[in-house]
Image: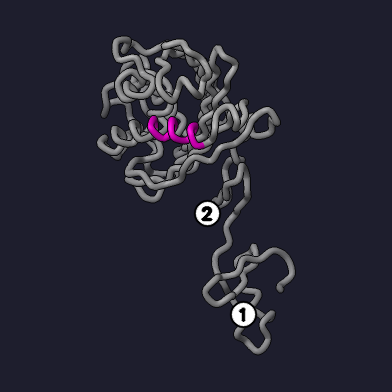
Amino acid sequence: MPDGPAIACPYHGWAFGADGRCRKVPQAHEPLRGMKGGTTGHHAAERYGWIWVALEDPIADIPDIAEAHDPRFRQIDEFHEEWDVAGLRLMENSFDMAHLSYVHANTFGILEEPRPAPVEIEHTPWGFVMRGEAPVTNKGLSKDLIKTDSERTVRMIEGRWFLPFLRASRIDYPTGLTHVLVTAATPVDDRRSRICQWVYRNDAEADAPAEKVIAFDRAVTIEDKAVLESSTWDVPLSMSEELHMPSDKPGIEMRRRLAALLAEHGEAEARLPQEA
């Protein structure tokens, strides 16, 4: 085997080093001599059970998710699949308190109470933290997972947004349960994204089987997916091209921060939105 870490192609066994250079060709007279050239090397790291890749020099660290280092929490990997949605649209949805009553009426939303709960936003170098409380229904599978007989409960939300397309939303319940949703979107092209989601919970498998946790969260994400894929794929960074209301504050802040980031790196797409 070549010196240092290498990855081998399963087709013919050629091995490539971290720098992309071909280091081994099993069919050659001198297998370890490799060959000139190879493939392009990219920055890559393993974190939280996923492979993170930067096609160019990274401009930010991999998000630090505190619960991942806390022994009280277990990690449940939920899904990774392609959606017909832009990453920014998905992120806005993740912090939109106004859609809960309608989009999620069949899982936890209260259709009769459409007014969104107020939120506070704390700006950070890597994005922002949004805090708020949302009343929700507690029925079916949700009741089994939260471990309460009450028909209603409240979600105390601390949503962390990491530029550009990752959120870690911590939901604390009065029962003491904490459920942290981590969702990341990797652009495939302008219209499609690869979505990865996993969660952290401070309970045990015997109390809330991973299968049930995944089933409930999956029902919620399918509701989101249906609406998002029917919306316009392009998300304008200017404030004049779409209508907004006060509860859109997190999304407006995302657009402002993303436009500033694009401008900082000389991207032509940068158009700073007006202040809300």
Q: Which one is nearer the viewer's eye here, 169 or 78?
A: 78
Question: Which numbered tag is attached to residue 55?
Answer: 2
**SS at circle 2:** loop
Residue at image point 60% right, 69% down: 8
In this image, 182 relative to 89: left or right?
A: right
- Amino acid tagged 1: Val
Residue identifier under label 1: 25
Q: Which one is nearer the viewer's eye here, 189 or 183?
A: 183
Mark 1 against mark 2, which lies toward the viewer?
1
**SS at circle 1:** loop
How many residues crowd mark 1 within 10 Å: few (<14), some (14–19), many (20+)?
Answer: some
Residue at image point 55% right, 29% down: 208
Q: Is residue 215 visible?
A: yes
State whether residue 11 is above or below residue 239. below
Location of the N terminus (image quadrant):
bottom right
Q: Which residues, given as a range, are shown in magenta?
A: 211-220
In this image, 264 relative to 202: left or right?
A: left
